[in-house]
Image (cartoon, grey):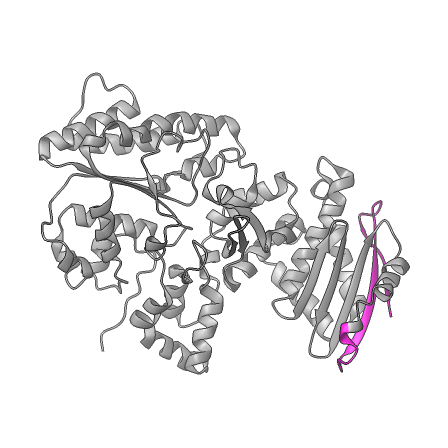
Protein backbone atom coordinates (compact mmCIF):
# COMPACT_ATOMS: atom_id res chain seq x y z
CA UNK A 1 0.00 0.00 0.00
CA UNK A 2 1.32 3.45 -0.94
CA UNK A 3 2.60 5.49 2.00
CA UNK A 4 0.45 8.53 2.75
CA UNK A 5 2.58 11.70 2.84
CA UNK A 6 1.28 14.65 4.84
CA UNK A 7 2.19 18.15 3.58
CA UNK A 8 3.51 19.45 6.89
CA UNK A 9 5.18 22.79 6.31
CA UNK A 10 4.91 22.37 2.51
CA UNK A 11 4.19 25.78 1.00
CA UNK A 12 4.87 24.97 -2.65
CA UNK A 13 1.85 23.67 -4.55
CA UNK A 14 4.08 22.32 -7.32
CA UNK A 15 6.21 20.34 -4.85
CA UNK A 16 3.10 19.07 -3.10
CA UNK A 17 1.55 17.78 -6.33
CA UNK A 18 4.70 16.38 -7.96
CA UNK A 19 5.89 14.58 -4.81
CA UNK A 20 2.55 12.96 -4.01
CA UNK A 21 1.54 14.75 -0.83
CA UNK A 22 -2.12 14.65 0.25
CA UNK A 23 -3.96 17.72 -1.02
CA UNK A 24 -7.33 18.91 0.24
CA UNK A 25 -8.84 20.32 -2.96
CA UNK A 26 -9.59 24.05 -2.67
CA UNK A 27 -9.38 24.76 -6.40
CA UNK A 28 -13.12 25.31 -6.95
CA UNK A 29 -12.87 28.29 -4.58
CA UNK A 30 -9.72 29.46 -6.34
CA UNK A 31 -11.52 29.41 -9.68
CA UNK A 32 -14.35 31.43 -8.16
CA UNK A 33 -11.81 33.98 -6.88
CA UNK A 34 -10.08 34.55 -10.19
CA UNK A 35 -13.28 34.75 -12.23
CA UNK A 36 -15.39 37.00 -9.97
CA UNK A 37 -12.98 39.65 -8.69
CA UNK A 38 -9.63 41.35 -9.05
CA UNK A 39 -8.33 42.42 -5.61
CA UNK A 40 -8.52 40.37 -2.44
CA UNK A 41 -7.32 40.32 1.13
CA UNK A 42 -7.44 37.25 3.39
CA UNK A 43 -6.61 37.20 7.08
CA UNK A 44 -5.96 33.84 8.71
CA UNK A 45 -3.79 32.70 11.66
CA UNK A 46 -0.25 31.49 11.03
CA UNK A 47 0.22 27.91 9.79
CA UNK A 48 -3.26 27.91 8.29
CA UNK A 49 -2.29 27.39 4.65
CA UNK A 50 -2.11 30.99 3.37
CA UNK A 51 1.26 30.47 1.69
CA UNK A 52 0.08 27.28 0.00
CA UNK A 53 -3.00 29.14 -1.25
CA UNK A 54 -0.82 31.80 -2.91
CA UNK A 55 1.47 29.14 -4.35
CA UNK A 56 -1.58 27.42 -5.85
CA UNK A 57 -2.67 30.72 -7.39
CA UNK A 58 0.83 31.20 -8.81
CA UNK A 59 0.79 27.75 -10.42
CA UNK A 60 -2.62 28.51 -11.90
CA UNK A 61 -1.55 31.85 -13.37
CA UNK A 62 1.62 30.32 -14.78
CA UNK A 63 -0.62 27.91 -16.67
CA UNK A 64 0.72 24.71 -15.09
CA UNK A 65 -2.32 22.69 -15.98
CA UNK A 66 -0.63 19.34 -15.33
CA UNK A 67 -0.44 20.12 -11.61
CA UNK A 68 -4.23 20.38 -11.43
CA UNK A 69 -5.09 16.98 -12.91
CA UNK A 70 -7.94 15.37 -11.03
CA UNK A 71 -8.82 18.56 -9.15
CA UNK A 72 -12.05 20.54 -9.41
CA UNK A 73 -10.53 23.39 -11.40
CA UNK A 74 -9.47 21.04 -14.20
CA UNK A 75 -13.11 20.80 -15.30
CA UNK A 76 -13.86 24.49 -14.65
CA UNK A 77 -11.01 26.24 -16.46
CA UNK A 78 -10.85 26.01 -20.25
CA UNK A 79 -8.14 28.55 -21.19
CA UNK A 80 -5.12 28.20 -18.85
CA UNK A 81 -3.55 31.52 -19.87
CA UNK A 82 0.12 31.92 -18.91
CA UNK A 83 0.57 35.24 -17.09
CA UNK A 84 3.48 37.05 -15.41
CA UNK A 85 3.37 36.55 -11.63
CA UNK A 86 4.97 38.87 -9.07
CA UNK A 87 5.05 36.90 -5.82
CA UNK A 88 6.35 38.77 -2.76
CA UNK A 89 6.91 36.82 0.48
CA UNK A 90 7.44 39.13 3.47
CA UNK A 91 7.56 36.21 5.88
CA UNK A 92 11.24 35.65 5.18
CA UNK A 93 12.55 38.82 6.82
CA UNK A 94 13.35 39.96 10.33
CA UNK A 95 12.10 43.50 10.73
CA UNK A 96 14.03 45.17 13.51
CA UNK A 97 15.68 48.17 11.81
CA UNK A 98 14.50 50.98 9.48
CA UNK A 99 16.23 49.47 6.45
CA UNK A 100 15.13 45.87 7.11
CA UNK A 101 12.00 46.24 4.99
CA UNK A 102 13.82 48.16 2.24
CA UNK A 103 16.31 45.31 1.84
CA UNK A 104 13.58 42.69 1.44
CA UNK A 105 11.67 44.79 -1.10
CA UNK A 106 14.84 45.70 -2.98
CA UNK A 107 15.80 42.05 -3.25
CA UNK A 108 12.41 41.14 -4.76
CA UNK A 109 12.41 44.12 -7.13
CA UNK A 110 15.94 43.37 -8.33
CA UNK A 111 14.94 39.80 -9.21
CA UNK A 112 11.91 41.05 -11.19
CA UNK A 113 14.01 43.74 -12.90
CA UNK A 114 16.42 41.10 -14.14
CA UNK A 115 13.47 39.56 -15.96
CA UNK A 116 11.54 42.65 -17.07
CA UNK A 117 14.16 45.44 -17.08
CA UNK A 118 14.49 48.81 -15.33
CA UNK A 119 13.59 52.43 -15.98
CA UNK A 120 16.00 55.37 -15.46
CA UNK A 121 13.48 57.49 -13.56
CA UNK A 122 12.49 54.71 -11.17
CA UNK A 123 14.29 55.91 -8.06
CA UNK A 124 11.91 54.75 -5.31
CA UNK A 125 10.68 51.30 -4.35
CA UNK A 126 7.11 52.15 -5.41
CA UNK A 127 8.23 53.57 -8.78
CA UNK A 128 10.36 50.52 -9.46
CA UNK A 129 7.40 48.25 -8.66
CA UNK A 130 5.14 50.31 -10.94
CA UNK A 131 7.65 50.10 -13.80
CA UNK A 132 8.02 46.33 -13.41
CA UNK A 133 4.24 45.84 -13.59
CA UNK A 134 4.00 47.96 -16.74
CA UNK A 135 6.90 46.28 -18.55
CA UNK A 136 5.72 42.77 -17.57
CA UNK A 137 2.39 43.43 -19.31
CA UNK A 138 4.00 45.09 -22.34
CA UNK A 139 6.47 42.22 -22.81
CA UNK A 140 4.04 39.33 -22.32
CA UNK A 141 0.78 40.79 -23.58
CA UNK A 142 -1.02 39.64 -20.46
CA UNK A 143 -1.97 41.40 -17.25
CA UNK A 144 -0.02 40.41 -14.15
CA UNK A 145 -0.96 38.57 -10.98
CA UNK A 146 0.45 40.17 -7.82
CA UNK A 147 0.62 37.92 -4.76
CA UNK A 148 1.82 39.24 -1.38
CA UNK A 149 2.32 36.73 1.43
CA UNK A 150 2.25 37.98 5.05
CA UNK A 151 1.91 41.63 4.00
CA UNK A 152 1.69 42.66 7.69
CA UNK A 153 4.84 40.95 9.02
CA UNK A 154 6.90 44.19 9.24
CA UNK A 155 4.09 46.06 11.05
CA UNK A 156 3.51 43.24 13.52
CA UNK A 157 7.17 42.86 14.41
CA UNK A 158 7.39 46.61 15.03
CA UNK A 159 4.45 46.78 17.47
CA UNK A 160 5.70 48.76 20.45
CA UNK A 161 8.18 50.77 18.38
CA UNK A 162 6.20 53.74 17.08
CA UNK A 163 9.10 55.20 15.10
CA UNK A 164 9.75 51.92 13.30
CA UNK A 165 6.04 51.46 12.64
CA UNK A 166 5.97 54.90 11.05
CA UNK A 167 8.97 54.06 8.84
CA UNK A 168 7.39 50.82 7.62
CA UNK A 169 3.99 52.43 7.11
CA UNK A 170 5.54 55.20 4.99
CA UNK A 171 7.28 52.57 2.86
CA UNK A 172 4.38 50.16 2.47
CA UNK A 173 1.57 52.64 1.72
CA UNK A 174 2.97 53.84 -1.65
CA UNK A 175 4.32 50.36 -2.44
CA UNK A 176 0.94 48.66 -2.01
CA UNK A 177 -0.67 51.70 -3.63
CA UNK A 178 0.63 50.38 -6.96
CA UNK A 179 -2.22 47.83 -6.82
CA UNK A 180 -4.61 50.74 -7.21
CA UNK A 181 -2.74 53.06 -9.58
CA UNK A 182 -1.87 50.24 -12.02
CA UNK A 183 -5.35 48.71 -12.11
CA UNK A 184 -5.41 48.38 -15.90
CA UNK A 185 -2.27 46.23 -15.85
CA UNK A 186 -3.36 43.84 -13.09
CA UNK A 187 -5.44 40.68 -13.53
CA UNK A 188 -5.46 39.83 -9.83
CA UNK A 189 -3.95 41.21 -6.64
CA UNK A 190 -4.06 39.03 -3.53
CA UNK A 191 -2.66 39.92 -0.10
CA UNK A 192 -2.61 37.58 2.88
CA UNK A 193 -1.68 38.24 6.48
CA UNK A 194 -2.49 37.54 10.09
CA UNK A 195 -4.02 40.95 10.79
CA UNK A 196 -5.73 43.82 9.02
CA UNK A 197 -4.24 47.18 9.88
CA UNK A 198 -6.75 50.00 9.54
CA UNK A 199 -7.23 53.70 10.17
CA UNK A 200 -4.14 55.65 9.01
CA UNK A 201 -2.16 52.51 8.36
CA UNK A 202 -1.15 50.64 5.20
CA UNK A 203 -4.72 49.73 4.24
CA UNK A 204 -6.14 53.22 4.26
CA UNK A 205 -5.56 53.76 0.51
CA UNK A 206 -6.38 50.23 -0.62
CA UNK A 207 -10.14 50.63 -0.75
CA UNK A 208 -10.29 48.46 -3.88
CA UNK A 209 -9.38 45.32 -1.90
CA UNK A 210 -12.20 42.86 -1.26
CA UNK A 211 -11.71 41.50 2.25
CA UNK A 212 -12.86 37.87 2.21
CA UNK A 213 -11.68 37.07 5.74
CA UNK A 214 -15.25 36.88 7.08
CA UNK A 215 -17.02 36.07 3.81
CA UNK A 216 -19.17 32.97 4.25
CA UNK A 217 -18.48 31.72 0.72
CA UNK A 218 -14.73 31.68 1.44
CA UNK A 219 -14.79 30.54 5.09
CA UNK A 220 -13.08 27.24 4.25
CA UNK A 221 -10.57 28.46 1.66
CA UNK A 222 -7.87 27.69 4.25
CA UNK A 223 -8.10 25.04 6.95
CA UNK A 224 -10.07 21.79 6.95
CA UNK A 225 -13.81 21.30 7.47
CA UNK A 226 -15.37 18.30 9.17
CA UNK A 227 -16.57 17.02 5.78
CA UNK A 228 -13.04 17.32 4.38
CA UNK A 229 -11.63 15.60 7.46
CA UNK A 230 -13.75 12.50 6.86
CA UNK A 231 -13.39 12.65 3.07
CA UNK A 232 -9.60 12.86 2.98
CA UNK A 233 -8.50 11.46 6.35
CA UNK A 234 -11.06 8.86 7.44
CA UNK A 235 -8.50 6.04 7.17
CA UNK A 236 -6.12 8.10 9.30
CA UNK A 237 -8.80 8.55 11.96
CA UNK A 238 -9.29 4.77 12.13
CA UNK A 239 -5.53 4.22 12.37
CA UNK A 240 -5.23 6.88 15.08
CA UNK A 241 -8.02 5.19 17.02
CA UNK A 242 -6.20 1.84 16.84
CA UNK A 243 -2.85 3.32 17.87
CA UNK A 244 -4.35 5.27 20.79
CA UNK A 245 -6.51 2.36 21.95
CA UNK A 246 -9.73 4.32 21.43
CA UNK A 247 -12.87 3.62 19.47
CA UNK A 248 -13.50 5.58 16.26
CA UNK A 249 -16.20 7.87 17.71
CA UNK A 250 -14.04 8.77 20.72
CA UNK A 251 -11.01 9.63 18.61
CA UNK A 252 -13.16 11.82 16.33
CA UNK A 253 -14.45 13.73 19.36
CA UNK A 254 -10.91 14.11 20.73
CA UNK A 255 -9.61 15.46 17.41
CA UNK A 256 -12.53 17.88 17.30
CA UNK A 257 -12.01 19.06 20.88
CA UNK A 258 -8.31 19.67 20.33
CA UNK A 259 -8.11 21.13 16.82
CA UNK A 260 -11.56 22.19 15.55
CA UNK A 261 -13.56 25.25 16.51
CA UNK A 262 -12.24 28.10 14.36
CA UNK A 263 -15.14 30.28 13.19
CA UNK A 264 -14.39 33.23 10.94
CA UNK A 265 -17.99 34.41 11.08
CA UNK A 266 -20.97 33.52 13.24
CA UNK A 267 -23.11 30.47 12.50
CA UNK A 268 -20.55 28.93 10.14
CA UNK A 269 -19.00 25.43 10.14
CA UNK A 270 -16.02 24.95 12.43
CA UNK A 271 -12.60 24.81 10.77
CA UNK A 272 -9.81 22.50 11.93
CA UNK A 273 -6.28 23.79 12.28
CA UNK A 274 -4.57 22.01 9.34
CA UNK A 275 -1.06 22.12 10.81
CA UNK A 276 -2.06 20.36 14.04
CA UNK A 277 -4.29 17.89 12.23
CA UNK A 278 -1.59 16.83 9.75
CA UNK A 279 1.00 16.50 12.51
CA UNK A 280 -1.35 14.35 14.54
CA UNK A 281 -1.85 11.93 11.65
CA UNK A 282 1.84 11.94 10.77
CA UNK A 283 2.89 11.07 14.34
CA UNK A 284 -0.32 9.17 15.18
CA UNK A 285 -0.27 11.02 18.48
CA UNK A 286 -2.02 14.04 19.95
CA UNK A 287 0.07 17.11 20.71
CA UNK A 288 0.20 20.89 20.83
CA UNK A 289 1.74 21.16 17.39
CA UNK A 290 0.58 24.64 16.41
CA UNK A 291 1.82 26.10 19.66
CA UNK A 292 5.17 24.36 19.36
CA UNK A 293 5.93 26.53 16.31
CA UNK A 294 6.09 29.62 18.53
CA UNK A 295 3.83 32.35 19.83
CA UNK A 296 4.57 35.96 18.84
CA UNK A 297 5.95 38.02 21.72
CA UNK A 298 3.89 41.05 20.71
CA UNK A 299 0.77 39.41 22.20
CA UNK A 300 2.18 39.41 25.73
CA UNK A 301 3.64 42.86 25.15
CA UNK A 302 0.15 44.22 24.38
CA UNK A 303 -1.51 42.42 27.30
CA UNK A 304 1.01 43.79 29.79
CA UNK A 305 1.28 47.24 28.25
CA UNK A 306 -2.47 47.79 28.55
CA UNK A 307 -2.74 46.10 31.98
CA UNK A 308 -5.24 43.59 30.68
CA UNK A 309 -7.13 41.29 33.05
CA UNK A 310 -6.56 37.84 31.62
CA UNK A 311 -9.93 36.47 32.73
CA UNK A 312 -11.60 39.04 30.47
CA UNK A 313 -10.20 37.29 27.40
CA UNK A 314 -12.77 34.52 27.74
CA UNK A 315 -16.17 35.23 26.22
CA UNK A 316 -15.20 38.83 25.49
CA UNK A 317 -17.73 40.82 23.45
CA UNK A 318 -16.64 43.14 20.63
CA UNK A 319 -18.17 44.97 17.68
CA UNK A 320 -17.44 44.15 14.05
CA UNK A 321 -15.35 47.32 13.77
CA UNK A 322 -13.01 45.95 16.42
CA UNK A 323 -12.72 42.60 14.65
CA UNK A 324 -12.20 44.15 11.25
CA UNK A 325 -8.95 45.99 11.89
CA UNK A 326 -6.35 47.02 14.39
CA UNK A 327 -4.48 50.29 14.55
CA UNK A 328 -0.76 50.29 14.09
CA UNK A 329 -0.11 51.29 17.69
CA UNK A 330 -1.87 48.17 18.99
CA UNK A 331 -3.92 50.05 21.60
CA UNK A 332 -6.38 47.19 22.08
CA UNK A 333 -4.93 43.67 22.45
CA UNK A 334 -8.15 41.77 21.69
CA UNK A 335 -8.28 42.32 17.89
CA UNK A 336 -4.65 41.24 17.60
CA UNK A 337 -5.26 38.14 19.72
CA UNK A 338 -8.36 37.31 17.65
CA UNK A 339 -6.72 37.82 14.28
CA UNK A 340 -3.66 35.86 15.39
CA UNK A 341 -5.87 32.80 15.98
CA UNK A 342 -5.97 32.63 19.77
CA UNK A 343 -9.62 33.67 19.90
CA UNK A 344 -12.43 32.92 17.49
CA UNK A 345 -16.08 33.86 16.97
CA UNK A 346 -18.42 31.81 19.14
CA UNK A 347 -21.67 33.78 19.00
CA UNK A 348 -23.29 36.93 17.63
CA UNK A 349 -25.99 39.26 18.98
CA UNK A 350 -27.64 40.89 15.93
CA UNK A 351 -29.64 43.33 18.06
CA UNK A 352 -26.53 45.02 19.43
CA UNK A 353 -24.05 43.94 16.75
CA UNK A 354 -21.80 42.19 19.27
CA UNK A 355 -19.57 39.19 18.59
CA UNK A 356 -18.61 36.86 21.44
CA UNK A 357 -15.03 35.62 21.23
CA UNK A 358 -13.46 32.65 23.00
CA UNK A 359 -10.68 30.12 22.55
CA UNK A 360 -11.30 27.91 19.49
CA UNK A 361 -10.18 24.64 21.05
CA UNK A 362 -8.23 23.00 23.85
CA UNK A 363 -4.86 23.17 22.10
CA UNK A 364 -5.06 26.94 21.84
CA UNK A 365 -6.55 27.55 25.27
CA UNK A 366 -4.12 25.37 27.17
CA UNK A 367 -1.14 26.43 25.07
CA UNK A 368 -1.88 30.13 25.40
CA UNK A 369 -2.28 30.04 29.17
CA UNK A 370 0.88 27.94 29.54
CA UNK A 371 2.72 30.41 27.34
CA UNK A 372 1.60 33.32 29.53
CA UNK A 373 2.77 31.71 32.76
CA UNK A 374 6.51 32.62 32.61
CA UNK A 375 5.63 36.25 31.81
CA UNK A 376 3.58 36.66 34.99
CA UNK A 377 5.26 34.14 37.29
CA UNK A 378 8.97 33.59 37.73
CA UNK A 379 8.88 30.07 36.34
CA UNK A 380 10.36 28.99 33.04
CA UNK A 381 8.38 27.22 30.33
CA UNK A 382 10.19 24.03 31.31
CA UNK A 383 9.27 24.41 35.00
CA UNK A 384 5.64 25.41 34.48
CA UNK A 385 4.18 21.94 33.65
CA UNK A 386 5.80 20.41 36.74
CA UNK A 387 4.45 23.16 38.98
CA UNK A 388 0.93 22.70 37.63
CA UNK A 389 1.19 18.94 38.11
CA UNK A 390 2.11 19.51 41.75
CA UNK A 391 -0.81 21.92 42.16
CA UNK A 392 -3.23 19.40 40.70
CA UNK A 393 -1.80 16.59 42.86
CA UNK A 394 -2.31 18.63 46.02
CA UNK A 395 -5.86 19.51 45.03
CA UNK A 396 -6.73 15.90 44.22
CA UNK A 397 -5.31 14.71 47.55
CA UNK A 398 -6.97 17.38 49.67
CA UNK A 399 -3.61 18.94 50.63
CA UNK A 400 -4.89 22.49 51.07
CA UNK A 401 -1.90 23.80 53.02
CA UNK A 402 0.54 22.41 50.44
CA UNK A 403 -1.44 24.04 47.66
CA UNK A 404 -1.45 27.49 49.25
CA UNK A 405 2.19 27.33 50.30
CA UNK A 406 3.03 26.63 46.66
CA UNK A 407 0.83 29.52 45.55
CA UNK A 408 2.61 31.77 48.05
CA UNK A 409 5.94 30.85 46.48
CA UNK A 410 4.62 31.91 43.06
CA UNK A 411 3.88 35.39 44.34
CA UNK A 412 7.08 35.60 46.40
CA UNK A 413 9.31 34.76 43.41
CA UNK A 414 7.84 37.44 41.15
CA UNK A 415 10.10 40.52 40.78
CA UNK A 416 8.65 43.72 42.24
CA UNK A 417 8.66 45.56 38.91
CA UNK A 418 6.70 42.72 37.26
CA UNK A 419 4.00 43.09 39.90
CA UNK A 420 3.57 46.83 40.23
CA UNK A 421 4.85 48.40 37.00
CA UNK A 422 4.00 52.09 36.80
CA UNK A 423 0.86 51.92 38.93
CA UNK A 424 1.53 50.06 42.22
CA UNK A 425 -1.97 50.33 43.73
CA UNK A 426 -3.81 49.17 40.63
CA UNK A 427 -1.28 46.65 39.38
CA UNK A 428 -0.87 44.70 42.63
CA UNK A 429 -4.55 43.81 42.38
CA UNK A 430 -4.20 43.06 38.68
CA UNK A 431 -1.17 40.87 39.30
CA UNK A 432 -2.99 38.83 41.95
CA UNK A 433 -5.90 38.26 39.60
CA UNK A 434 -3.78 37.35 36.58
CA UNK A 435 -1.62 34.85 38.50
CA UNK A 436 -4.72 33.23 39.99
CA UNK A 437 -6.33 33.09 36.56
CA UNK A 438 -3.29 31.31 35.08
CA UNK A 439 -2.95 28.81 37.91
CA UNK A 440 -6.62 27.89 38.11
CA UNK A 441 -7.12 27.87 34.34
CA UNK A 442 -4.27 25.40 33.92
CA UNK A 443 -5.52 23.33 36.86
CA UNK A 444 -8.92 23.33 35.18
CA UNK A 445 -7.62 21.15 32.35
CA UNK A 446 -7.19 18.34 34.87
CA UNK A 447 -9.89 19.23 37.39
CA UNK A 448 -13.24 20.98 37.05
CA UNK A 449 -13.02 24.71 37.70
CA UNK A 450 -15.93 27.13 37.79
CA UNK A 451 -15.44 30.78 38.64
CA UNK A 452 -16.86 34.18 38.03
CA UNK A 453 -15.16 37.49 38.54
CA UNK A 454 -15.86 41.10 39.36
CA UNK A 455 -13.53 43.96 40.12
CA UNK A 456 -11.45 43.34 43.23
CA UNK A 457 -12.37 39.71 43.96
CA UNK A 458 -12.39 36.19 42.61
CA UNK A 459 -14.88 33.52 43.68
CA UNK A 460 -13.82 30.05 42.72
CA UNK A 461 -15.21 26.51 42.87
CA UNK A 462 -12.74 23.71 42.20
CA UNK A 463 -13.93 20.10 41.95
CA UNK A 464 -12.22 16.70 41.90
CA UNK A 465 -13.72 13.24 42.18
CA UNK A 466 -13.40 13.41 45.99
CA UNK A 467 -13.45 17.09 46.96
CA UNK A 468 -15.21 20.39 46.32
CA UNK A 469 -13.33 23.57 47.23
CA UNK A 470 -15.23 26.84 47.50
CA UNK A 471 -12.76 29.74 47.74
CA UNK A 472 -13.09 33.46 48.33
CA UNK A 473 -10.10 35.76 47.86
CA UNK A 474 -9.93 39.15 49.59
CA UNK A 475 -7.43 41.92 49.07
CA UNK A 476 -7.07 44.44 51.90
CA UNK A 477 -9.41 42.38 54.09
CA UNK A 478 -9.04 39.38 56.41
CA UNK A 479 -9.37 35.68 55.76
CA UNK A 480 -12.17 35.67 58.33
CA UNK A 481 -14.11 38.19 56.26
CA UNK A 482 -13.57 36.11 53.12
CA UNK A 483 -14.85 32.97 54.87
CA UNK A 484 -17.82 34.88 56.31
CA UNK A 485 -18.80 36.00 52.81
CA UNK A 486 -18.94 32.38 51.63
CA UNK A 487 -21.37 31.57 54.43
CA UNK A 488 -23.42 34.77 54.25
CA UNK A 489 -24.00 34.54 50.51
CA UNK A 490 -24.70 30.81 50.53
CA UNK A 491 -22.01 29.90 48.03
CA UNK A 492 -22.12 26.24 49.11
CA UNK A 493 -25.89 25.74 49.03
CA UNK A 494 -25.76 24.24 45.53
CA UNK A 495 -23.54 21.41 46.82
CA UNK A 496 -25.64 20.42 49.85
CA UNK A 497 -26.60 17.03 48.40
CA UNK A 498 -23.21 16.31 46.81
CA UNK A 499 -21.47 13.34 48.52
CA UNK A 500 -17.98 14.78 48.03
CA UNK A 501 -16.09 16.40 50.89
CA UNK A 502 -16.70 20.16 50.86
CA UNK A 503 -14.13 22.74 51.95
CA UNK A 504 -14.81 26.46 52.40
CA UNK A 505 -11.62 28.49 52.12
CA UNK A 506 -11.19 32.19 52.86
CA UNK A 507 -7.97 33.78 51.63
CA UNK A 508 -6.53 37.22 52.30
CA UNK A 509 -3.92 39.11 50.26
CA UNK A 510 -1.54 41.65 51.76
CA UNK A 511 -0.75 44.74 49.66
CA UNK A 512 2.41 45.35 51.68
CA UNK A 513 3.73 41.79 51.34
CA UNK A 514 2.34 41.47 47.81
CA UNK A 515 1.42 37.91 48.65
CA UNK A 516 -1.14 35.63 50.27
CA UNK A 517 -1.19 36.58 53.95
CA UNK A 518 -3.48 33.92 55.44
CA UNK A 519 -6.05 31.27 54.59
CA UNK A 520 -8.77 29.72 56.73
CA UNK A 521 -10.48 26.41 56.03
CA UNK A 522 -13.89 25.34 57.28
Question: So how many labels did they put on this image?
Answer: 0
Q: Is 330 situated left or right of 169 in this image?
A: right
| Residue shown at the point (73%, 52%) measured from the top left | 454
Residue positioned 56% across, 61% down in the render: 366
Decide: is 441 above or below 160. below
Q: Quadrant of residue 452?
A: bottom right
Extreme-top residue of the structure = 121
Rendered location of residue 186, percent (x, y): 20, 35
In the image, is residue 264 above or below residue 461? above
Where residue 389 appears, x then y in whole percent? 65, 67
Q: Between residues 97 and 200, which one lies in front from this camera angle?
A: 200
**Residue 486 covered by magenta stretch:** no
Residue at position x 43%, y 40% in the image: 196
Which residues lie in the magenta part? 494-522
User: Residue 416, can we see it?
Assistant: no
Q: Is residue 370 visible?
A: yes
Q: In what quadrant of the picture does the N terminus appear?
A: bottom left
Residue 245 falls in which quadrant of the image? bottom left
In the rendered structure, the answer to whether residue 455 lies left or right of residue 198 reads right
Q: Quadrant of the C terminus?
A: bottom right
Q: 247 and 117: which one is in front?
A: 247
User: x, y (%) of residue 456?
Assistant: 77, 49
Answer with left or right where residue 242 lies relative to residue 332: left
Amino acid sequence: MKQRIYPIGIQSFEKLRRDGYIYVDKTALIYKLVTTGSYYFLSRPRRFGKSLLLSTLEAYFRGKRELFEGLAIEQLEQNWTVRPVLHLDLNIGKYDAPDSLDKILDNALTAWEEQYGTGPSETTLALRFKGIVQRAVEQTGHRVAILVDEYDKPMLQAIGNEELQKEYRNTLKPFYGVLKTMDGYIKLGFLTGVTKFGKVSVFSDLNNLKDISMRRDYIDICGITDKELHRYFDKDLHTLADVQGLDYETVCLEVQKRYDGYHFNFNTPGIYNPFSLLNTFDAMAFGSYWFATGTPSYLVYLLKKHHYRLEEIEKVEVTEDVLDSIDSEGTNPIPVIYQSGYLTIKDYDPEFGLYTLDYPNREVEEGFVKYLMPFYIDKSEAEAPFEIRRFVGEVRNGNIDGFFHRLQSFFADAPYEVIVGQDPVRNVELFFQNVLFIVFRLAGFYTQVEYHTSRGRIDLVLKTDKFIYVMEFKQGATAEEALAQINEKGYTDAFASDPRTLYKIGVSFSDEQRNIERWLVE
